[in-house]
Image: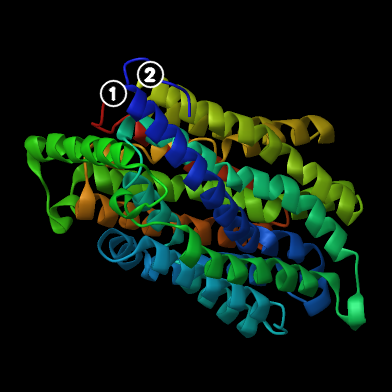
Amino acid sequence: MDSEPNLSDVGQRARRRIARRLLPFLFILYFIAYLDRVNVGFAGLEMSHNLGFTDRVFGLGAGIFFVGYFLFEIPGALIVEHWSARRWIARILISWGLVTILVSMIRTPAQFYGARFFLGAAEAGFFPGILVYLTHWFRHEDRARAGALFMSAIPIANVLGSPLAGWLLGVRWFGIPGWRWLFILEGIPATLLGIMTLLYLTDWPREAKWLPADEQEWIDGELQREKAAKAAIGSRTVRQALAQRDVILLALIYFLALIGLYGFNFWFPTILKRATGLPNLTVTLIVALPYLLGTFLMVWNGWDSDRTGERRWHTAVILGLCGIFMALSVSASGNLWAGLAFLILAGACTMAFMPSFWSLPTAFLSESAAAASIGLINSVGNLGGFVGPYFVGFLRNLTGSFTFSMIFMIVALLFSAALVLTLRVRRT
């Protein structure tokens, strides 16, 4: 991580060592997680036709993942805080890897719904658990940058996963269609990484044999001072934190933002394919473009947010631009390639708001209150991952066009951006 002139030599060494040890591995874990989460969007290019699924069936199946996800988020975040991040994250990886492989065997809408529900339940707690885990190792001043490097796995998973998916959709090994191989071959790494997680991650700095004693003492002292400063403002119980105005607002903001994010992620390949008629491999290569651009935007957002200590505007502006670019895409519907260019810019913004956004709850909460709040925000927010894909498919079936689906996402994104500016959390 970048040096900070006011830090002691031991502080600089500790920050660099912790970042080098943890962030690449956490990035790989989330890279695999996100591949497993969004591969259904690519599989849908062939799966729906192969199995006779309508847009409404596909949208419901894609989104129902988040119903299972919703139910176990808060318990998962608290388990990481009070038990063991290493063991809980390993359990999640192994179970969701096995369920992803099972998704390859579905044949009916009911099986599709059930498999996606259990996949969401298996993965529940992973993302908020990692966010809580980062609070065990990184100061608040470093957390947006650390989060940005970890969360950059989202766009990069799409950049690398898109051509991989395009290639796999074209194979037919042993008489099995490519979309089934997509689930099989992307489920196996999660199970193997779960086993590696048990051996590699360390729950707390005091348990880290790879961290010298003076660096252990420094990071532990920094985190304890941070907790003490928050406690001096007024400590909160889990129940008080969950009922707090800004926590509820953050959950609503994330819910609306994820309507746009997952509505775009799951349907962009299909929209592009139907608009252009291009081959699957070409479609998946074009789909990678917004995520390539989004990687740079996300890392910049985390870096600049930490540099300035400002979180709200860094979040609101990107969400607002996402909605504006999507609206420009709709208005340019008469010009296919102009509309596509605006849609690519919108896609780049769909996830770039996350580093500054996820620094907001830990700015005023710590320990169990922060863990439970992160779980609540993520669980309620991810219901937007159900609402977005489902209503995009529903409105497409109802109207015969994606225009109203896009307007639905635009309204959600602009409303989300406006709500960010009503938060009381200031410069941190």
Q: Are marks 1 and 2 in contact (CB under 8 Å)?
A: yes
Residue at 46% over, 72% down = 91
Q: Which residue is mark 2?
A: 308
Q: Which residue in the rendered view is the most extreme toward the top? A: 5
Most foreground residue, 133 or 111: 133
Q: Is residue 408 visible?
A: no
370 to 299, vertically: above or below: below
Q: Amino acid at mark 1?
A: Arg
Most foreground residue, 65 or 271: 65
- Left or right: residue 359 versus residue 230 is right
334 to 262, vertically: above or below: above
Q: Which residue is mark 1?
A: 427
Q: Amino acid at mark 2?
A: Thr
Which corner quadrant of the image does residue 32 belong to? Answer: bottom right
Q: 10 Å neighbourhood of mark 1: few (<14), some, or many (≥20)?
A: few
Residue at 38% over, 59% down = 379
- Left or right: residue 370 versus residue 16 is left
